[in-house]
Amino acid sequence: MKILNEIRTAIITLLCLSGPMVVFGQQDPIYSQYIFNMQTVNPAYVGSWQTLGFVALDREQWLGITGHPTTQTFSIQTPIISQNIGVGLDMVIDKLGSERRVMLGANYSYRISIDETTSLRFGLKAGFTNYNNNLPTLQPFPDGQVDPILQNAITSKFMPNVGTGLFLSSSKYYLSLSLPKLFETKINENSGYSSRMSEAREYYLLGGVVFNISDNLKFKPTFMTKAAVGSPLQYDLSANFLMAEKFWLGGVYRSGDAVGVVAQWIINNRLRIGYAVDFTTTDLRNYHNRVHELMLSYEIAFIKKEYTSPRYF
């Protein structure tokens, strides 16, 4: 009962820290392989691997369209002090046309053991976004004329931020609740004709569970929801199968956007390679060559301890 009260108090505290919300505009990057990339949205995830871990991810969205969105993610995490504390760094480079955002975050988590197999991590994130939009280089007119409004526009801004999260997990399931950006930042362009919300406060709720179907087959359904006032609720649903403890294969559905196929090869206890392809369900599918996402993760087990193998999330 004491543990349940602590969990309830932690969740209420996280929601209260967020304060009132009014959100419009740009959302953070999305990922099809979010299951293995939760550090970018929840600082409490760091240290949960029980190893020194590295992740690199590249997402190429709507290939074939000039200036299509691209996202590169790089992260590192590790547990320290008998696995109770986790620390990590993550960097996200997000591009869309002339717009470029570089996001850097430092993450900290502290683990509380609930029983022999279940733990709750509390996380904090501190970082910044460096926003750039080279508007004067745009040519909206076919004859090459320069738009005087764009010449006077703000093209860069430095935006610090903080975030928080909770991560409840065992070897067979996880539940994640986070607010990676507590502060909202509005970019007003000098022209007076336009305004852009670059930092939006978004809530993430993720979860998943692993079922043993047979000795060589496991089933893992997962979900992710992302909510912000002023924007429609977005959710992802996925179904994944692990075959012979070596190969993940599954599908993902993203509300109002796409369906996709996700695969991951577990080369050994250290190296994993993941690939996902999305098929857009809107009319935009007629104008691009799908969405492709490639992920690479590597782990170093420098602490001598018995681990669950393989890691399911």
Image (spheres, grey):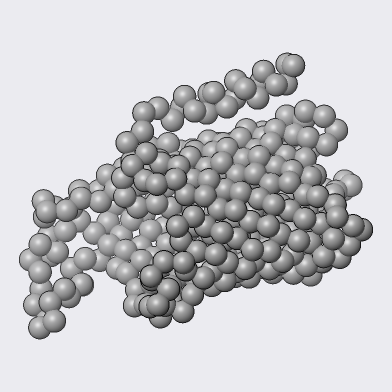
Above/below status of 103 relative to 175: below
Res. 292 in view: yes
- Residue for point 66% across, 39% down: 175
Q: Percent from the top left, x then y, of residue 228?
A: 41, 41
Residues 248 and 301: in front is: 248
- Residue for point 33% across, 56% down: 131
Res. 58 in view: no
Above/below status of 128 relative to 55: above
Residues 162 and 235: in front is: 235
Above/below status of 246 relative to 308: below
Residues 296 and 235: in front is: 235
Please count the marks in the image.
0
Above/below status of 126 relative to 8: below
Say left or right for 304 vs 265: right
Q: Quadrant of the N terminus?
A: top right
Say left or right for 45 vs 232: right
Say left or right for 49 vs 20: right
- Residue for point 30% across, 60% down: 132
Which residue is the extreme one toward the bottom?
A: 143
Residues 96 and 239: in front is: 239
- Residue for point 87% across, 46% down: 305
Q: Percent from the top left, x then y, of residue 22?
A: 32, 36
Q: Percent from the top left, x then y, of residue 238?
A: 63, 56
Q: Percent from the top left, x then y, of residue 91?
A: 51, 56
